[in-house]
């Protein structure tokens, strides 16, 4: 975490620390904060300050529930929002208990939505508009991530349910156990289903009125899955992957995390990198998932240790001298 960033410490309970924060904000393009609602205003960095003293700043607030609504002041946690948003109610085995995702998906995606909002506001500023306040929240992210499941519920009025690894709108589109391992199969349309059925040695499925069209397979999901699962269990995973790939049916093995990190595709895309750190030496980390043809991204700096760049930031951004910095350190402002 925090690669390519400089890290500083600042005592924001002290008026002098708050004053330094205001000076830093005046020199900034973007300010991102996820304090409790109203905290920035308490430090003298509220909307009036931003508008009058730092009109260029894009001020991004990340909250639990947004600044609107009855829960605007409540703190937010990924697990709670996975539960509250309905995501857990649609995740897990059919008939099993609701289940959270294995990573804090709402936390991560809220960061992405915040980034999109910041980029949009910067683009507006580039067109001559002033800086503005943008907001992303765990709650709105959780609701947005319902995506097609929300559309199904809003249009049909019917409750959503857990389908294990199945897809709510496409069948067969899930994982199946082979004789030695699991594979994931995505039969995205009726033409693929015809090739899939033939590859499994059951071309008669395409003429069965229960399975001929995707809408029929959704209605008869359990019967379809049972037939496919019984067939898949008869041969090893690699054999099925080779057969289905040759037939033009998308499929892949279910990897463990270590298997995914060691995969040739991961290496080819630079998604695992070695980083030199000043205190722990070389360590392995994830790479950058985006590609830029003209301005490629790179990891230039390791995660900073606590307060590593405090003096450098105060010198570079605010022009403070060594004596002033030492006084702040002695007074525990930094």
Image (cartoon, helix red, strand yellow):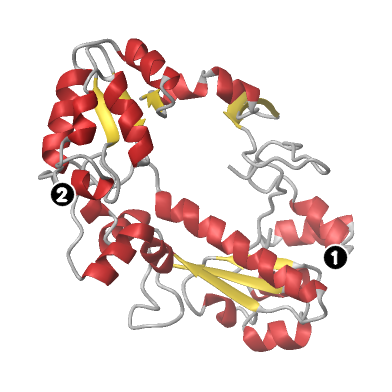
Task: Name the residue: 42% across, 29% down.
Answer: 250
User: In this rendering, would 246 be left or right of 184?
Assistant: right
Q: In this view, does 30 lie above or below 286?
A: below
> Image quarter for residue 235?
top left
Which quadrant would the C terminus be assigned to in this image?
bottom right
Image position, residue 262 (x, y; %)? 51, 18
Regarding residue 67, the answer to whether it shows in the image is yes
User: In this rendering, would 30 be left or right of 259?
Assistant: right
Q: In this view, does 334 lie above or below 239?
A: below
Q: Mark 1, mark 2: which one is toward the viewer?
A: 2
Dot label at residue 318: 1
Task: Name the residue: 63% across, 78% down.
Answer: 133
Dot label at residue 219: 2
Task: Name the residue: 75% across, 48% down.
Answer: 309
User: What SS does tag 1 mark?
Assistant: helix
Task: Name the residue: 89% across, 59% down.
Answer: 321
| Dots 1, 2 in contact, CB < 8 A | no
User: What SS does tag 2 mark?
Assistant: helix
Q: Nearer the viewer, residue 33 or 323?
A: 33
Q: Which of 15 and 211 is in front in this view?
A: 211
Which quadrant would the N terminus be assigned to in this image?
top right
Regarding residue 16, the answer to whether it shows in the image is no
> Image quarter for residue 210?
top left
Q: Residues within 10 Å of mark 2 (few under 14, many from 20)?
A: few
């Amino acid at each position: 975490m925090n690669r390519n960033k400089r890290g500083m410490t600042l005592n924001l309970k002290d008026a002098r620390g708050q004053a330094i924060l205001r000076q830093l904000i005046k020199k900034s393009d973007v300010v991102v904060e996820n304090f409790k609602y109203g905290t920035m205003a308490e430090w003298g960095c509220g909307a009036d300050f931003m508008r009058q003293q730092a009109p260029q700043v894009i001020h991004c607030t990340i909250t639990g529930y947004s600044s609107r609504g009855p829960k605007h002041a409540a703190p937010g946690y990924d697990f709670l929002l996975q539960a509250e948003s309905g995501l857990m109610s649609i995740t897990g085995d059919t008939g099993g208990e609701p289940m959270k995702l294995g990573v804090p998906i709402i936390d991560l995606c809220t960061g992405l939505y915040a980034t999109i909002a910041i980029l949009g506001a910067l683009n507006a500023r580039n067109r001559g508009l002033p800086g503005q306040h943008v907001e992303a929240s765990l709650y709105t992210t959780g609701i947005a991530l319902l995506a097609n499941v929300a559309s199904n519920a809003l249009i049909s009025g019917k409750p959503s349910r857990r389908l294990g690894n199945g897809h709510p709108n496409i069948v067969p589109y899930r994982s199946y156990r082979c004789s030695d391992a699991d594979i994931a199969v995505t039969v995205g349309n009726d033409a693929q289903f015809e090739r899939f059925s033939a590859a499994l040695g059951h071309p008669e499925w395409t003429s069965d009125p229960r399975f001929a069209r995707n809408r029929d397979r959704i209605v008869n999901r359990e019967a379809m899955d049972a037939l496919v699962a019984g067939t898949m269990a008869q041969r090893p995973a690699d054999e099925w992957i080779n057969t289905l790939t040759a037939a033009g049916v998308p499929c892949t093995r279910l990897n463990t995390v270590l298997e995914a990190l060691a995969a040739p595709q991961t290496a080819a895309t630079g998604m695992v990198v070695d980083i030199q750190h000043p205190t722990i030496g070389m360590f392995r980390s994830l790479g950058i998932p985006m590609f830029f043809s003209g301005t490629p991204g790179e990891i230039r700096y390791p995660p900073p240790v606590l307060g590593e760049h405090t003096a450098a930031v105060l010198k570079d951004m605010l022009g403070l001298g060594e004596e002033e910095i030492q006084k702040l350190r002695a007074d525990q402002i930094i």
